[in-house]
Image (spheres, rainbow, N blue to C red):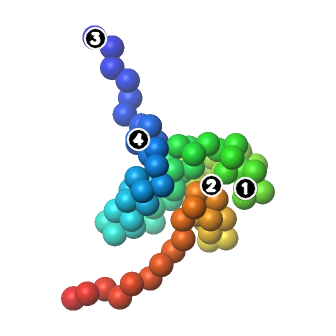
């Protein structure tokens, strides 16, 4: 029996699924997990499309969104806009 490697990008097939995934990671994750999640979303949408919309090259995107990367905030904001997302701050209830 042959198995394939799980890739979350294969399941990010709607704006709602993308938003749910990213919001979950934002609530639970650290900065590395958030960058990785944005990379998964960019891959699901298509790196070429994201590169065109951000003005960044595909190699730059792959590098900025790879494990262990520390992209500039401006890069994250460009990619978020390209994937149809935005940052919103809500008070922490406690």
How far apart are the two marked residues, 2 and 3, measured between alpha carbons? 36 Å
Whether 37 is drawn above or below 10: the answer is: below
**Residue 64 badge:** 2
Q: Residues within 10 Å of mark 4 (few under 14, many from 20)?
A: few
Q: Quadrant of the N terminus?
A: top left
How far apart are the two marked residues, 4 and 3, measured between alpha carbons? 22 Å
How far apart are the two marked residues, 2 and 1, measured between alpha carbons? 15 Å
Q: Secondary structure at mark 4?
A: helix
How far apart are the two marked residues, 1 and 3, measured between alpha carbons? 41 Å
Q: Are marks 2 and 3 in contact (CB under 8 Å)?
A: no
* Marks 4 and 3, the one that precedes in the sequence: 3
Q: Which residue is mark 4?
A: 11
Whether 39 is drawn above or below 86: the answer is: above
| Residue drawn at the location 44% of the way across and 46% of the way down | 12
How far apart are the two marked residues, 1 and 4, measured between alpha carbons? 22 Å
Q: Which residue is mark 3?
A: 1
Q: Secondary structure at mark 3?
A: loop
* Marks 1 and 3, the one that precedes in the sequence: 3
């Amino acid at each position: 029996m042959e198995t394939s490697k799980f890739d979350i990008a294969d399941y990010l097939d709607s704006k709602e699924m993308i938003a749910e995934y990213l919001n979950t990671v934002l609530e639970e994750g650290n900065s590395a997990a958030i960058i990785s999640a944005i990379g998964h979303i960019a891959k699901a949408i298509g790196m070429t499309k994201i590169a065109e919309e951000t003005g960044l090259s595909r190699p730059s995107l792959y590098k900025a969104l790879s494990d262990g990367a520390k992209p500039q905030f401006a890069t994250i904001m460009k990619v978020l806009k390209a994937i149809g997302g935005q940052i919103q701050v809500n008070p922490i209830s406690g």
